[in-house]
């Protein structure tokens, strides 16, 4: 299964994905983050929240495109889900393949390690001199967490995603923690019984 | 401290204020160049066959505003005989050198805009020379000053200590690569989204944008790598 999904990811990336200039992407994302920081007056927790919300909205729609391009069928275990995310999902949208490590004993949470170079952070340096707390509070790539949360919610998985380490902060690597809370049953909309 | 200008042994601090010892051996054998890359700790100026070291790098904006200058090879008191106050003669020497490099950068500006060099550059662009764009501006005080103007008008000036044996096309290509590396380094720093630019300051004129320690270390790394070639 793992081999075939990796092959799929590479194949789809090569053939049926429209690409844009990576520097344009990096600079655009950088401007977004920088502008958010200015707008919120350096309240980085709020910036993180906003990035997460933006990512969430993106994820809700991104999952449709993902399913359309890949035709991946329902995963039976969360492990499979994580593998598909890293080998196919990240691959076809960002052309990176994070590695998965640190599975918890119940198989419900794992770490995604984003290998350098991270396309979102190509030229970025956090301005520690200007504002030291940025190093402790801002998660630069927070939008990715939101994307995962939104996308997985649309396939009935309620997850929590957050950053644990970030190379921009000086850590040795960039690590996200992905945790499955529960599988959502299709709920009847409120108001109907 | 960049190794290139530092004297190899404490004794050598008494040597004449040439920033490095130009060895009498300037053979460019391939064998010795391999050795000099392997033995990192040995003094570069002794073993490297090229014996050209970069003395300074400076950036000037399109409106002739100086943006940045970093000099290398400043003599420093060696760590083995360190005293808390470095002797005043060293400081004066470093200050003089730094001033000299500033002056050389300013002189370079005159050459950039002089009609003679403009016509020279036009000539170069006609002859499909690989080293188009890089000009040897002038040689002064044993330092050969090269200049390169980017498409945006940014001028990069590099001073290289003169070596008696410069083979034309080979060193031209190397110098062209050096300028490209420096330009790439500049671009990386410019593209940092957290630059905190005021909206009214043109990015090409902003004087503080390059004054970051990361930029310093990156330029130093490029220089050291080039010196080892």
Image (cartoon, grey):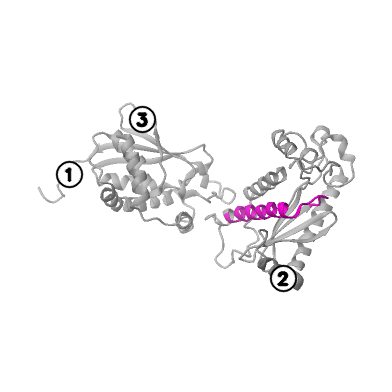
Count residues near mark 3 (Cα–Cα under 10 Å), then give few for <14, some for 14-19, many for 20+. some
Q: In this view, does B7 lie above or below B167?
A: above
Q: In screen coordinates, is A105 left or right of B168?
A: left
Q: Looking at this view, is A191 or A14 the one in front?
A: A14
Q: Where is residue B7 in the image (x, y as percent from the top left)?
A: 82, 39
Query: Please, which chain is the residue tagged with disc 2 on?
Result: B
Look at the magenta stretch and give its main secondary structure. Answer: helix
Name the mark on residue A103.
Answer: 3
Residues drawn in magenta: B161-187
Q: Are marks 1 and 2 in contact (CB under 8 Å)?
A: no
Give the foreground label among 3 and 1.
3
Query: Few, some or many C-alpha atoms within 10 Å of disc 2 (few <14, some 14-19, many ≥20)?
Result: few
Q: Do labels 3 and 1 share a chain?
A: yes
Asked if residue B89 can be seen in this view, the reply is yes
Q: Is residue B164 magenta?
A: yes
Q: Quadrant of the N terminus of chain A?
A: top left
Is A58 above or below relative to B44?
below
Residue A191 x/y as whole percent: 13, 51
Q: For the residues marked 3 and 1, what is the alpha-carbon distance in whole angstroms?
A: 27 Å
Kindly give the residue lying farthest to the top in the view shown: A105
Chain-order first, disc 3 or disc 1: 3
Give the label, 2 or 3, closer to the camera. 2
Q: Mark 1 points at which residue?
A: A186
Q: Which residue lies furthest to the left in this view?
A: A193
Q: Tell me what residue is drawn at x 62 percent, y 56 percent.
A: B183
Q: Position of residue A72 (x, y in %)?
A: 26, 43
Q: Mark 2 points at which residue?
A: B118
| Circle 1 Cα neighbour tier, 10 Å, few/some/many (<14 / 14–19 / ≥20) | few
Q: Nearer the viewer, residue B78 or B136?
A: B136
Q: Position of residue B32 (x, y in %)?
A: 75, 37
| Same chain shared by disc 1 and disc 2 | no
């Amino acid at each position: 299964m793992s081999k075939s999904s990796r092959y799929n990811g590479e194949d789809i990336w090569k053939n049926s994905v429209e690409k844009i200039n990576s520097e344009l992407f990096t600079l655009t994302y950088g401007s977004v983050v920088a502008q958010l920081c200015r707008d919120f007056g350096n309240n980085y927790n709020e910036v993180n929240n906003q990035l997460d919300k933006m990512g969430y909205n993106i994820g809700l729609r991104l999952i449709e495109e993902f399913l359309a391009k890949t035709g991946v069928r329902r995963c039976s275990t969360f492990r499979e889900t994580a593998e598909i995310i890293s080998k196919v999902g990240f691959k076809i949208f960002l052309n990176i393949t994070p590695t998965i490590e640190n599975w918890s004993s119940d198989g419900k949470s794992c770490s995604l390690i984003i290998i350098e170079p991270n396309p979102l952070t190509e030229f970025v340096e956090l301005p520690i001199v200007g504002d030291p707390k940025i190093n402790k509070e801002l998660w630069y790539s927070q939008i990715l967490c939101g994307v995962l949360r939104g996308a997985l919610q649309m396939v009935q998985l309620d997850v929590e995603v957050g950053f644990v380490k970030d190379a921009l902060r000086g850590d040795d690597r960039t690590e996200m923690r992905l945790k499955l809370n529960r599988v959502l049953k299709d709920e009847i909309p409120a108001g109907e019984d | 401290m960049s190794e290139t200008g530092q004297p190899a042994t404490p004794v050598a601090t008494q040597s004449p204020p040439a920033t490095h010892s130009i060895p009498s051996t300037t053979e460019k054998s391939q064998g010795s160049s391999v050795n000099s890359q392997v033995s990192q700790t040995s003094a570069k100026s002794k073993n490297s066959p090229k014996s050209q070291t970069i003395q300074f790098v400076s950036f000037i904006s399109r409106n002739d505003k100086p943006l940045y200058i970093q000099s290398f090879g400043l003599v420093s008191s060696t760590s083995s005989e360190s005293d808390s106050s470095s002797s005043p003669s060293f400081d004066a020497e470093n200050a003089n050198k730094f001033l000299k490099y500033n002056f050389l950068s300013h002189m370079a500006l005159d050459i950039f805009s002089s009609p003679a060099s403009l016509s020279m550059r036009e000539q170069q662009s006609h002859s499909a020379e690989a080293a188009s764009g890089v000009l040897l501006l002038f040689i002064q005080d044993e330092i050969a000053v090269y200049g390169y103007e980017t498409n945006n008008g940014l001028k990069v000036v590099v001073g290289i200590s003169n070596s008696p044996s410069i083979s034309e096309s080979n060193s031209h290509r190397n110098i062209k690569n050096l300028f490209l590396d420096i330009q790439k380094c500049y671009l990386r720093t410019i593209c940092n989204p957290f630059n905190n630019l005021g909206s009214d300051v043109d990015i090409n004129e902003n004087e503080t944008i390059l004054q970051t320690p990361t930029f310093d270390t990156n330029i130093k790394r490029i220089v050291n790598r080039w010196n080892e070639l």
